[in-house]
Amino acid sequence: MSTATTPIIAGVVLAGGQSRRMGHDKATLPFHGNTLLEHTQQLLSHCGFDPVLVCGNRPDALRDRHTGRGPLAGLDSALQYGLAHGIAGLLLVPVDMPLLDRNSVLALSQTGQPQQRVTHYQGHPLPMYCPVTAATARLCEQLLQDDNPRQRALHVFAHAARALTLAADTAARTLDNINTPDDWQQLLAAQQD
């Protein structure tokens, strides 16, 4: 008599960017009593993902095997972790998307029933659901070896993986990234209204 186990889907916060346009680490910006990193970790935890991993050059984070290769290197680190720990899927979110909401995250992952396809919103490579398989890990590794930085992008990975693309509600602004001090000030001003 066997008992079925629930597949594990890990939440992954990509927090390895250099924040050049912002001028300082976006992960440390204060947002609703937390940092953006803590806010994003809590969102993934409240969505039911366990574990919640952080990729980036910071304490207690998964370190990139391929430094200086952008978000795809963070995906690679998470895939390697997932393969080693029996994780079925990853839900990746960037640290700089503070308005991302639970519904947008869960629509990608269908928590509890891991999909077999990479999934993201049209026009937005992140957030992204990625199944943890040898094939996705190989594809990620192959793209990371390319000398052309344009080929080491998450949208290239999604296209090569024949990703499922969901329609995005652009009016909701939940998929907006915060990249500059002006972006940040506009977000804070909108939160005051």
Image (tube, rainbow, N blue to C red):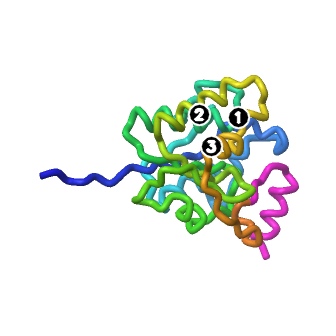
Q: Earlier in the sequence, mark 3 or mark 2?
A: 3
CB-based contact (under 8 Å), mark 3 and mark 2: no
Residue on which the image places disc 3: 14
| Mark 1 surroundings: few (<14), some (14-19) or many (≥20) residues within 10 A | many
Q: Quadrant location of residue 104?
A: bottom right
Look at discs 1 and 3 and give the one toward the viewer.
1
Q: Where is residue 25 in the image (x, y as percent from the top left)?
A: 73, 41
Give, as a three-letter code, the residue at label 3: Leu
- The part of the chain drawn in magenta is 176-193
Q: Where is residue 13 in the image (x, y as percent from the top left)?
A: 59, 46
Left or right, residue 21 beside residue 81: right
Say what secondary structure mark 2 lies in: helix
Image height of 168 relative to 27, above or below: below
Q: Earlier in the sequence, mark 1 or mark 3?
A: 3
Q: Where is residue 103 in the image (x, y as percent from the top left)?
A: 57, 68
Q: Quadrant location of residue 147?
A: top right
Give, as a three-letter code, the residue at label 1: Gly
Q: Position of residue 129 (x, y in %)?
A: 56, 51
- Which residue is rendered at x = 55% and y = 41% of the image? 54
Residue on which the image places disc 1: 70
Examine the rendering and report whether any part of residue 111 can be seen.
yes
Look at discs 1 and 2 and give the one toward the viewer.
2
Examine the rendering and report whether any part of residue 62 can be seen.
no
Residue on which the image places disc 2: 139
Cα distance, mark 1 to mark 3?
10 Å
Left or right, residue 16 beside residue 138: right
Say what secondary structure mark 3 lies in: strand
- Which residue is rendered at x = 47% and y = 41% of the image? 132
CB-based contact (under 8 Å), mark 1 and mark 2: no
Residue positioned most to the bottom: 193
CB-based contact (under 8 Å), mark 1 and mark 3: no
